[in-house]
C-alpha cells in the first residue's frame, strides 16, 4: 500500500502546481479593464450603441463590446471559447 500513497501524493502535488501556475498572472490586461469600464459607464448612462445603432440594454453585451474594442487595440485578452452546435 505505500506505493499507492506515493503515487497519490505525487498526483496531488502536480495538480497543485498546475492550479498555482494557472492562477498566476492576469487574465485580462489593465488596458482591457479600462476599455470595459468605459463601455459599462456609457451603458449605465444609456449612451452605448451596438453596431446596428440600437441602444444596448444588456450588461453582458456592454462587456462584450468593451472586450472587442480592447482586442482590436491589441490588449491581452484570452481567446473566445469555441461553441459547438449539436445538429
Image (cartoon, rainbow, N blue to C red):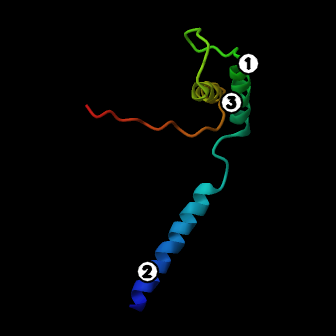
| Residue at mark 2 | 7
Residue 12: image x %, image y %? Answer: 50, 73
Q: CA distance from mark 2 to mark 1?
A: 57 Å
Q: In the picture provided, is 3 more to the left or to the right than 33?
A: left
> Residue lying furthest left in this view?
87
Q: Earlier in the sequence, mark 1 or mark 3?
A: 3
Count how many numbered circles sit on residues in the image.
Answer: 3
Q: Helix or strand or loop: what does disc 2 sit on?
A: helix
| Residue at mark 3 | 36
Residue 52: image x %, image y %? Answer: 55, 9
Q: CA distance from mark 1 to mark 3?
A: 14 Å
For the C terminus, the image quarter is: top left
Compared with residue 13, is residue 56 higher up or lower down, i.e. above or below?
above
Please identify the quarter of the rendering in which residue 54 is found: top right
Please identify the quarter of the rendering in which residue 24 is found: bottom right
Q: In the picture provided, is 81 more to the left or to the right than 63?
A: left
Q: How many other residues sit within 10 Å of disc 2, few (<14), some (14-19) or many (≥20)?
A: few
> For the point 65% across and 41% down, which residue is it?
28
Amino acid at each position: 500500500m505505500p506505493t499507492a500513497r506515493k503515487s497519490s501524493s505525487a498526483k496531488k502535488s502536480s495538480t497543485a502546481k498546475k492550479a498555482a501556475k494557472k492562477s498566476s498572472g492576469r487574465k485580462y490586461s489593465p488596458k482591457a479593464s479600462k476599455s470595459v469600464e468605459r463601455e459599462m459607464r456609457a451603458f449605465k448612462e444609456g449612451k452605448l450603441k451596438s453596431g446596428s445603432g440600437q441602444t444596448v440594454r444588456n450588461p453582458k453585451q456592454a462587456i462584450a463590446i468593451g472586450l472587442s474594442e480592447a482586442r482590436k487595440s491589441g490588449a491581452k485578452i484570452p481567446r473566445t471559447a469555441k461553441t459547438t452546435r449539436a445538429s
